[in-house]
Image (tube, rainbow, N blue to C red):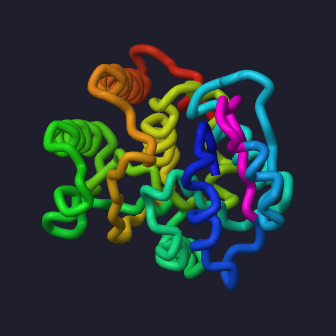
Amino acid sequence: MPAHNAARTLERTVQAIPRDLVDEIILVDDKSTDDTIALARRIPELRVIWHPHNVGYGGNQKTCYLEALQRDADVVVMLHPDGQYEPTLIPDMVRPILEGEADLVLGSRFLTPGGPSAGGMPRYKQHANRFLTSVENRVMGTQLSEMHTGYRAYSRAFLMGIPFLRNALDFSFDSEVLMQAAHFGYRIAEVPAKTIYFDDASSIGLRASAVYGLKTLRAAARLAAHRAGIIRSRIFLP
């Protein structure tokens, strides 16, 4: 659980996690300015790690995955503590990995007709999501319905096999992980998921979304250039 100022939603999100399938819950706090750390330390199910300074969404995930790998996790699920994604979908997220059908699973909001609108996703984000996903599909050679979901599950072999520590510290980390998955030949699956937009849920604004979109396009260009042998990129080297 990559956390930043999640005190208002953390407890109810943790309570909804199906414990019959989840062995450990790791929360990494990225220098929150609210009571996230104090609250997290009172929840016995959580293993809490804190950053002494803010390193960004991508940097937070790096710590999450390193800790999970060092604790011998077989499957790692990224679940936002803001309650925007449903914890009850975790069994569906991990099933393709446990059954040997996928290395990376995405919880897609676009697999269900009308799903994004039903969850309250702003129209501009829907259009931007579809546009970026179409560009990425063309570059990566995939046919995914959505590449900009924050609900993801990874196999241990996948996280050990991609150089995710070389990736960006910001939100473009997620896009780079998908580019690496395609480049190194890992199997990607999707399951239907939905999000709920509400006041306490974290969501980036229009300007941050635009920056993220541009950085996603840049990551796609880097993959294309790397594959063409024009410019070699460290994030696509073994």
Q: Percent position (x, y) of residue 211?
A: 34, 20
Left or right for 198, reference 16: left
Q: Residue at x 61, y 37 (%)?
A: 4
In this rendering, is residue 59 above or below 153?
Answer: above
Residues 213 and 8: in front is 8
Quadrant hosting residue 14: bottom right
Q: Percent position (x, y) of residue 70?
A: 85, 52
Q: Is residue 28 magenta?
A: yes
Q: Percent position (x, y) of residue 189?
A: 41, 65
Residues 236 and 210: in front is 210
In this rendering, is residue 57 above or below 78?
Answer: above
Residues 92 and 117: in front is 117
Q: Residue at x 46, y 42 (%)?
A: 183
Say if residue 126 shows up in the picture: yes
Q: Residue at x 73, y 39 (%)?
A: 63
Left or right for 121, reference 190: left
Q: Residue at x 40, y 22 (%)?
A: 222
Left or right for 236, reference 142: right
Say if residue 228 shows up in the picture: no
The stretch of residues the image draws in magenta is 25-36
Q: Is residue 5 magenta?
A: no
Report the number of numbered marks. Answer: 0
Quadrant hosting residue 140: top left
